[in-house]
Amino acid sequence: MAVDPMLQGLVAGFAVEAQEVIQKVTMDLLELEREGLENDALAKIYTRLGRHLHTLKGSASSLGLQDLGDIAHRLEDALAPLKATTQKMPRTVVDILLHGLDLFMLRAQAHADGRGDYLPDPAAALAQLVASAPPPEAASVLPGGAFAHAHTQAQPQAPSLVGAGPSEPGAPSSSDPQGESADSGWRVSARQVTSLMREVERLREVRLRVEERSRELERVSTLLAKQGLLAETAEARTLLSGTGRSLRTDGEETSDIVDALEEGLKAITTRPTRTILEPLQRMVRDLSRQLGKEARLSVVGAEVSLDRRLLEKLQGALVHLLRNAVDHGLEMPAEREKAGKHQEGALTLRVEQQGNLLYLEASDDGRGIDLVAVRRVAEKRGLVTADEMARLNDNQVRDLIFSAGFSTRSDVTDTSGRGVGLDAVRATVESLQGRIEVASTRGQGTRFVLTLPVDLGSSPVLMVRALEQYVGLPMLAVESTQLARADSLRVGKRRAHLEHLGQLLPVVDLGARLGLRASAPPAEGQPMLVVQSGGRRVALVVDAVVGDRDLVIRPLPSEVREVAAWQGAATLSRGELLLILRPDWVVSDSEKTQVSAASRRALVVDDSLTARALHRAMLEAGGFQVHLAASGARALERLAADTYDVVICDLDMEEMDGTELIARLREKKETRTLPVILVSAHDSAQARERGLAAGADGFLSKRECAAGRLLAEVLDVMSRRGSRA
Amino acid sequence: MKGTPRMVDEALAEETRELLARRAARLREQGESSVEEAVHWIAEFPLGEERYALPLESLRAALPLRMVTPVPLSEPAVIGVLRFQGQVLSALSLASLLGGHGWRQDPAVLLVVDRGDGELCALDCEAIPRPTTLSLASVEAARARSEGPVMEVFTQDRQLIHLINPKRLFSVSEAGVRHGR
């Protein structure tokens, strides 16, 4: 039957609208079957439900979709007696209504796809709806949406449209002869959107450059005013300040455009997480009914908007985790009561975004992971040998549940037992460059934490400094800042602790943690931040707190992505990058990562970043712990605070050259005999003589360094100094 | 009278020979130049005492070496990170990647290079590289001989150039990082 394209467009729009309304009705129904709701609250929900069902009926009838109108009418009939008495809805009625909604949506989607004529007689569906409730698992959520399952079932009834497949809500069907109508939107590839995002980022850089030019102009104006040429330069200064003003206005406008573009792109590419989380309520309810359990899912952070592609990939992972929690985690109601728990199991999904990191937590208050069973099954299934198992600690044993083929179920059920699940979840998370961790306490429950990088949006960051390194910390992780005071510090042999609100927090020196200097207790008045992540807290010692910024945190390139300390980088106003620390790394046990104090220490002083990097690489390969200084002045600061076995110093530096640094070192008793090797790009006898005459213990040209002589020279010089001492 | 037409014929034949000879010379020239066109464009630069090169097609930009943010705790070959056209790139020490020990002068330039997997990164370099060519045949021959990230190719004047294969270089260095962890 030929379908009017205009009417077809309206039906497609109706299907999208109906899906939204049905989602709301579903949430209300789940609420109505819970215990303990006040009469007022019940009445409100019934009224809202009635209104929604009436809307569905009216909209369907106005489009001539009589079968849908009839289904909605039957649902209203089922609701009416309960609405009149305002009582908790019996589960059987909830089942009937949910099934009715499934039928409604199935048929609405079929009409939208132009398959309405192939649908079975609505009378049969209506009779089935009234006659008996279907098994709850029939409506379980599958990736692709609450009604994907039902939609797929309808496919065989429409042979002429095989291949149309599940379509995006609101997207025109492939059978639409008119193709995409002008007002229905565009289909764009992810690559096109990503490329647009890059252009927005470039525009942001242009804006930063405009700001920088504006500052340069101001400096020129100030310079002209200082030269005592006030009268002569008056016209130029007026012109410059006018240009400066215009430039500032242009900068502000560019800033507005960047913000608007970013907001627009965000709206196009993201959607609230509730769109995937709310349908999971229904799945949890149906599955627990099927298994004879009781469960309630609470969602925290459902309003966080995320990349649509990310959400689509995560939906399957969350379904797995929740099914696992209901099936394996939660006990039967009687068992729970016996253990002193509420008969209704509590499942929680928590979504939180910190900077460019997304934390997704799925937890239950069930029986927890049985490590004995995990060990037994892993060995039985050949995942590890008995010897390997003996060497694993509890955390490593727990991680075995992510192995392919692992299942503690001995029987295969509809829900589990095939050993496919958590390994797939981990694969999904890792494909998104994220990671998954599990924590569990026997008898108390299990918590899975997924950490994933996300691209969009700015977030508040606190900028701090450790030596010359500026870094950012997501503000959400910073609880407070304070200055170190001797009376609140407890300094032990191995580490210091801060007394903070009745707790003793480990003190962590950021400079030492980043390998920039040796660890030392904080000096009086040194800034400290109380940083928390995942329930752990430390007092982080920094050299300066610069201030807070609202920054867009970008992911790091592959070569540094694996460095646990960093979660990304953000662009500062002058265009340089600021590295952003991962709070979970900051609070993790730092003692494991600290380099042994027994290793030899070298200080590399060079104003060339690449030379510092190269010397560091060579010396680290030779077993040295290496600290770096970009100038003679910085080197003196380092040497005043730390002790080193050798200094490798560039001869020709701008601020203070190598000979001057040596002279300063030889003046002090502590550094008089410290071995110093000068390195120079000048490979001349004159440069060598100059260096050795200044008191250097060794001299190498960069050509000799390039030939691999540095480490040998360092060892030679240290050995000569040692024998002289 | 008979001689005149013969002379004309001879003159014509001579002209024809000359014309054909010129055409042949032109064709020979074309042949020679088409051999010259079979070249591989490279960006050549010194590294330590030796001459290295990258395929010109892999080079995206040459930037002054500034605005690089060091990344503490990263691999020794990592100099830092920088912004380039809206992206965050790693700046890497080419000398370290190649297992060398240093430059004759401090590098002043960063070469933005396609790693061969569609991603970009920056490599340090003493100076802006010189675009030049290598015979394609010698590059192909070197490629057949070598499996590593650097191929030894001789120029026509018998100078040795170490031609870097970015794809192999980065797959080797990444494997190193993975094994090192």
Image (cartoon, coloured by chain):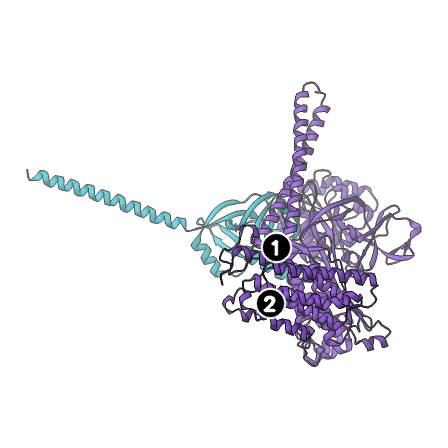
Question: Do callouts 1 and 2 mark residues in contact (Cβ within 8 Å)?
Answer: no
For the residues labelled 1 and 2, the Cα–Cα distance comes to 54 Å
Query: Of residues A583 and A509, which is closer to you in this image?
Result: A583
What SS does tag 2 mark? helix
Q: In the rendering, which numbered label is found on residue B97?
A: 1
Give residue A59's quadrant in the image.
bottom right
- Which color is chain B depicted in? cyan
Does any portion of residue A378 appear in the rendered image?
yes
Give residue A245's quadrant in the image.
top right
Q: In the rendering, which numbered label is found on residue A468?
A: none
> Image check: B73 left or right of A42?
left
Q: Is residue A379 above or below residue A524?
A: below
Label 1, residues with CA under 10 Å away: few <14, some 14-19, many ≥20:
some
Residue type marked 1: Leu
What SS does tag 1 mark? helix
Q: In the rendering, which numbered label is found on residue A151?
A: 2
Query: Of residues A207 and A188, which is closer to you in this image?
Result: A188
> Image check: B38 left or right of A127?
left
Q: Residue A536: give x, y in percent of width and height.
A: 82, 59
Query: Of residues A216 and A592, which is closer to you in this image?
Result: A216
* Residue at figure coordinates x 58%, y 48% from the top left: B112
Q: Residue B16: give x, y in percent of width and height.
A: 20, 43
Q: Residue A217: give x, y in percent of width and height.
A: 67, 30
- Looking at the image, the residue that sits furthest to the right is A487
Residue type marked 2: His
* Residue at figure coordinates x 69%, y 33% from the top left: A215
Closer to the eye: label 1 or 2: 2
Q: Residue A288: give x, y in percent of width and height.
A: 74, 73
Query: Of residues A697 and B81, which is closer to you in this image?
Result: B81
Q: Chain of mark 2?
A: A
- The chain letter of the purple chain reads A
> Image check: A630 left or right of A15?
right
